[in-house]
Amino acid sequence: QLLTEGTTPWQVYPRPQLKRNSYVNLNGSWEFTVSPDGQLPQVYDRTILVPFCPESQLSGLKFHPKDGDFLFYRRSFSTPELPAGGRLLLHIDGADQVAEVYVNQKHIGSHAGGYEAFTLDITDALQETNELLIRVTDDLRNTAHPYGKQTLKRGGMWYTPVSGIWQTVWLESVPQSYIAGLSIENRGASVTISVTPPLSGRVLVAGLGEFSLENGSVTISPEDPHMWSPEDPYLYEFSVETEQDRVESYFALRTLDIQKVDGVLRLCLNGV
C-alpha cells in the first residue's frame, strides 16, 4: 500500500541497487505555502503529504499552483548518528522543476530538472535539530527543461500538471570515504561491477563467493550461470565492501541477440 493512515508513505528503500542501512525517510506531513515572489515566508498556512504533488488527492491539497509561483516545503529532523568523519547526504528523488534547498536557513544548493534525482551534502549546516526548507518553482511556459506530457488542458496523450516534490525525500549517512556510484553492466553470461570513485575492496556474491575489486572494477563469469528470464527472473544478490563502506545490490545474467530462426531474423533472449 502506498499510504496507510498514520504511517509514512512510500517507505520502500528508494535506491535498491545501492543500498545502505543508514536510511531515514523524510516523507510525510510537511508545512507548505505558496508565494508569488519567492521570498522566504514567515507563515506556512497549509500542510502537504510528501511525496505527493499538490495536484493529487493524496497530497491533501488537490490544486494546481499558478505558473511561476514558488512552493515552499518545511519540516524539522534530528541529526542521525554519523560515523567518525562521516557525512550526511540529503536525497530528493524528484522535484518539478527548479529546487532550492536550505538547512537551518543556510542555502545548500539548487537543482533544475523535474525528472532527475539529486543529492546534496548537508553536513556542514547541521545542528542537533534541523530545519529543512525546499523551495520549488515550475512553469509550463518555460520550455528550457523537459516537462513530458503535462498540460493545463488534458486530453488525448496529455495529462494534468505535476508540480513540486513528487518523489521520496530521504537522508543517508556515509563514511568519509564512501561508494558514491555503482555500475552494473551485463555482458551476457558475465557481469562487470564498478564503483565510483574507484575504491579497493571486495564483492561478495551469494552462491558464487568473493571477488576482488581492481581499480574499482571486477568482472564475474559464473561457471554455471543461472540466466534470467520472465519465467525465472533470477537475481544474484551481492554486497560491495571497501575499507570504510558497505553497500548491497543485485544483478541478473541474460543474453540478448539477433539470430535467424526458420529463415527469419529474430530477437532472442538466452538464445530463444
Image: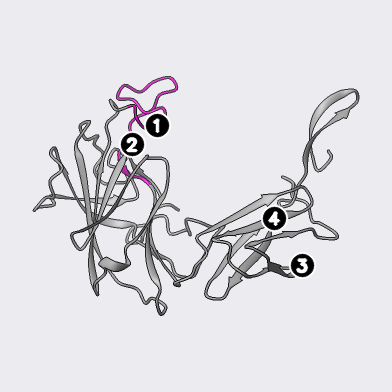
Tag on residue 208? Answer: 3
Q: Is residue 205 visible?
A: no
Q: CA distance from mark 1 to mark 2?
A: 12 Å
- Give yes or no for contact between labels 2 and 4 (Cβ–Cβ under 8 Å): no
Magenta stretch in the rendered image: 143-166
- Residue of label 4: 192
| Residue 267, quarter of the rendered image | top right
Left or right of 237: which side holds 197? left
Identify which residue, 138 or 230, lies in the foreground: 138
- Between tags 3 and 2, which lies in front? 3
Which image quadrant for residue 91?
A: bottom left
**First reached walking from the N terminus: tag 1 or tag 2:** 1
Q: Say which label, 2 or 4, has the lower sequence index.
A: 2
Residue 146's label in the rendered image is: 1
Q: Which one is earlier in the sequence, the residue at label 1 or at label 4?
A: 1
Locate the C terminus and report the quarter of the image it occupies.
top right
Q: Earlier in the sequence, mark 3 or mark 2?
A: 2
What amino acid type should be assigned to the residue bearing mark 1?
Pro
Q: Secondary structure at mark 1?
A: loop
Counting residues from the start of the chain, the first of labels 3 and 1 encountered is 1
View extreme (left): residue: 42
Image height of 110 relative to 174, above or below:
above
Vertical side of 139 occupied by 95: above or below: below
- The reply to whether dot 1 and dot 2 touch (C-beta < 8 Å) is no
User: Considering the numbered disc 3 on the image, is that residue within a helix, a strand or a loop?
Assistant: loop
Instruction: Calculate the distance from the C-alpha at mark 3 to the C-alpha at mark 4.
Output: 14 Å
